[in-house]
Image (cartoon, grey):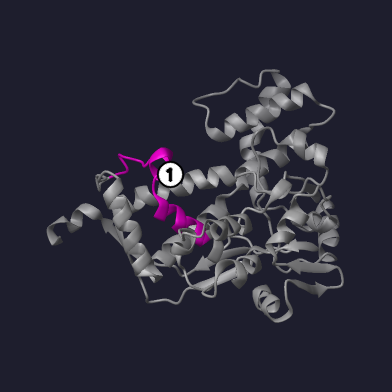
């Protein structure tokens, strides 16, 4: 049974296990996440694994000082879930993997190691971490920062720490941003009245895009002047959070975002207008209750990057292409921590192809 249903039946606090409490009261967000509680051992089973040894990423860092030091102006709060993996299985598989009897290596480890190897060699052998061939891509820039920190503070940062930071960079926000974008286009296609309002706002306030390419990417400043776009994005955060994870004591976004006292009776409807109502106090409460990125000291470190991607990509895409839903397959939501949309199909064509029909 969904947590939101349990909260409707039993109230704002639901005990779903011997030591697990779920809250959907907005006041609980402030009380729980603005306090400096220490992370529990819950996070240990979500670790990436290399040769039978857990690799700690920023998400798994339970020490507050360590987290503060290791952020280095970047980071990730992505939850790497392990479907069906119990607390008992994890140490057994780790032990087997450490002795070469079972391959427990996480999929992102080989990718990170391939890119990390040459940079570590340059750092260890030549003592020059700026030595490189060809242009420096974004991942290389991050690795350079990590390796400089390793050279400056070898007592805190070793090669395994660098690997963990690299994994944070590789996996940070990719799935969650993709899920949110997919959900946004799904709900726009499912609720055509909202889609038409957004398209009208884009047409009235933004220049026309050439249909052959993204020659004009909508800038952050332009996108911030589009209130209905902002409302659509917030409504997507509300109705389809990319993560569904409950810790031992805390709030779960899907349950919090379906609090009728905060968001209204039509909680299952995609209605961006709820973010544009004239009651400023009510809208302010909804903004405070929006839990898509967590809250307080547990806020996702990639929150601002996600906002930047959403506000630039959505209007740029919709000014360039016209999209239509494909109803041949039923949409499914697969939840294993990440709430992925399955069988989401649509057709698109360049908007200039429609000029003769207008």
Give the camera-side residue of 145 and 64. Answer: 64
Where is residue 12? Give x, y as percent.
73, 71
* Label 1 Cα neighbours within 10 Å, binned few <14 / some 14-19 / many ≥20: few
- Mark 1 secondary-structure assignment: loop
Q: Which residue is at a point 84% across and 55% down the rendered structure image?
A: 40
User: Is residue 227 found inside the magenta-colored segment of the image?
Assistant: yes
Where is residue 135? Give x, y as percent.
49, 26
Quarter of the view holding residue 323:
bottom left
User: Is residue 9 found inside the magenta-colored segment of the image?
Assistant: no
Quick check: 321 left or right of 305?
left
Quick check: 132 left or right of 128?
left
Looking at the image, is 112 positioned above or below residue 149?
Answer: below
Task: Specify start and end residues of the magenta stretch as a single range.
Answer: 213-236
Where is residue 317? Give x, y as percent.
35, 51
Residue 222 visible within the image: yes
Give the camera-side residue of 317 and 53. Answer: 317
Q: Which residue is at a point 69% across and 53% down the rendered structure image?
A: 106
The residue to which callout 1 is attached is 224
Looking at the image, is 330 positioned above or below residue 325?
Answer: below
Q: Which residue is at a point 68% across and 55% down the rendered structure image?
A: 79
Looking at the image, is 168 positioned above or below residue 237?
Answer: above
């Amino acid at each position: 049974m969904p947590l939101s249903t349990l909260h409707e039946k039993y109230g704002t606090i639901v005990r779903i296990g011997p030591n697990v409490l779920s809250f959907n009261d907005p006041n609980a967000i402030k009380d729980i996440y603005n306090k400096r509680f220490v992370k529990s051992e819950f996070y240990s089973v979500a670790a990436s694994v290399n040769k039978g040894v857990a690799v700690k990423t920023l998400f798994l860092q339970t020490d507050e000082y360590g987290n503060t030091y290791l952020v280095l102006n970047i980071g990730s709060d992505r939850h790497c879930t392990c479907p069906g993996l119990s607390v008992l299985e994890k140490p057994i598989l780790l032990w087997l993997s450490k002795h070469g009897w079972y391959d427990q290596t996480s999929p992102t480890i080989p990718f990170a190691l391939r890119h990390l190897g040459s940079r570590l060699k340059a750092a260890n052998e030549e003592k020059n971490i700026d030595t490189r061939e060809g242009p420096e891509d974004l991942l290389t820039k991050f690795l350079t920062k990590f390796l400089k920190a390793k050279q400056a503070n070898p007592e805190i940062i070793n090669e395994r720490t660098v690997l963990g930071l690299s994994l944070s960079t590789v996996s940070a926000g990719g799935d969650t941003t993709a899920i949110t974008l997919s959900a946004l286009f799904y709900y726009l296609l499912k609720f055509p009245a909202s889609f038409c309002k957004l398209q009208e706002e884009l047409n009235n306030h933004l220049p026309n895009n050439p249909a052959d390419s993204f020659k004009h990417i909508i800038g952050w400043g332009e996108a911030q002047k589009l209130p209905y776009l902002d409302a659509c994005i917030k409504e997507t955060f509300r109705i389809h959070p990319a993560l569904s994870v409950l810790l031992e004591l805390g709030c779960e976004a899907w349950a919090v975002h379906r609090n009728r006292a905060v968001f209204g009776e039509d909680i299952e409807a995609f209605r961006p207008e709820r973010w544009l109502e004239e009651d400023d106090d009510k809208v302010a409460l909804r903004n405070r209750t929006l839990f898509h990125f967590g809250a307080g000291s547990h806020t996702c470190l990639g929150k601002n990057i996600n906002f930047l991607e959403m506000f630039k990509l959505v209007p740029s895409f919709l000014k360039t292409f016209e999209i239509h839903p494909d109803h041949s397959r039923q949409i499914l939501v697969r939840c294993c921590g990440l709430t992925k949309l399955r069988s989401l199909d649509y057709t698109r064509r360049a908007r200039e192809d429609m000029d003769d029909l207008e």
